[in-house]
Image: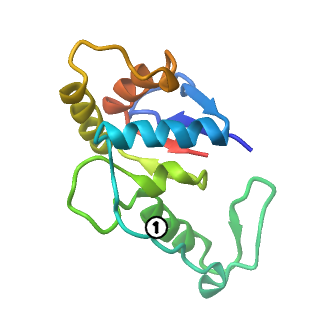
Amino acid sequence: MRFQLEMRLAAGDEVSPATIAFRPRRMARIVHAMTELNMTVDAGPPPKFPLWAVYGVSDFDSSGRPVGGRAGEYEDALRRILDSHGQTEEKGIPLHKLRTNLGWHVTADECVAAMSSYDACRPGEHSPGVFGAELIPFLRAAMVRDGFEVH
């Protein structure tokens, strides 16, 4: 199992999205460092996913898309949950989006808030070693795109 952070394309982008991946133990250390730098927020328990049976979805195809019933409505409800900031007005990346690889959408606004906190805490300093060379540039790029997804 790995955590794969996949850049979402901005409107009009045709280039395949950038991705970076981390093993679970390293991702836990990254989340801890981000929390220490006030880049994350505790948004309460993660939102509950919609029950596919309620939408009459009978199965999922080979690519994981729902089949049957009101599949489109189910996908829309799931997308709203994956985009949700949680139960807080605080700015930053909600912890639940970084602790599980269920397809959460970390929005561009959440990336902007995280990087503002990072820049305020570490003006001109090097990134924590656990971030590696790619995380901060990835987050800066996500600020001007449509954020990224955690798979």
The colour scheme used to paint the residues is: rainbow
Q: Image check: 99 left or right of 151? A: left
The residue that appears at 63% across and 33% down in the rendered structure is 22
Three-letter residue code for mark 1: Pro
Q: Nearer the viewer, residue 6 or 75?
A: 6
Image height of 142 relative to 88, above or below: above
Q: Nearer the viewer, residue 52 or 104?
A: 104
Image height of 71 relative to 135, above or below: below
Residue 30: x %, y % from top left: 49, 36
Image height of 117 relative to 95, above or below: above
Q: Is residue 148 visible?
A: no
The residue singled out by tag 1 in the image is 46
Residue 142: x %, y % from top left: 39, 31
Q: Nearer the viewer, residue 105 or 99?
A: 99
> How many numbered circles are shown?
1
Q: Quadrant of the N terminus?
A: top right
The residue that appears at 30% across and 69% down in the rendered structure is 87
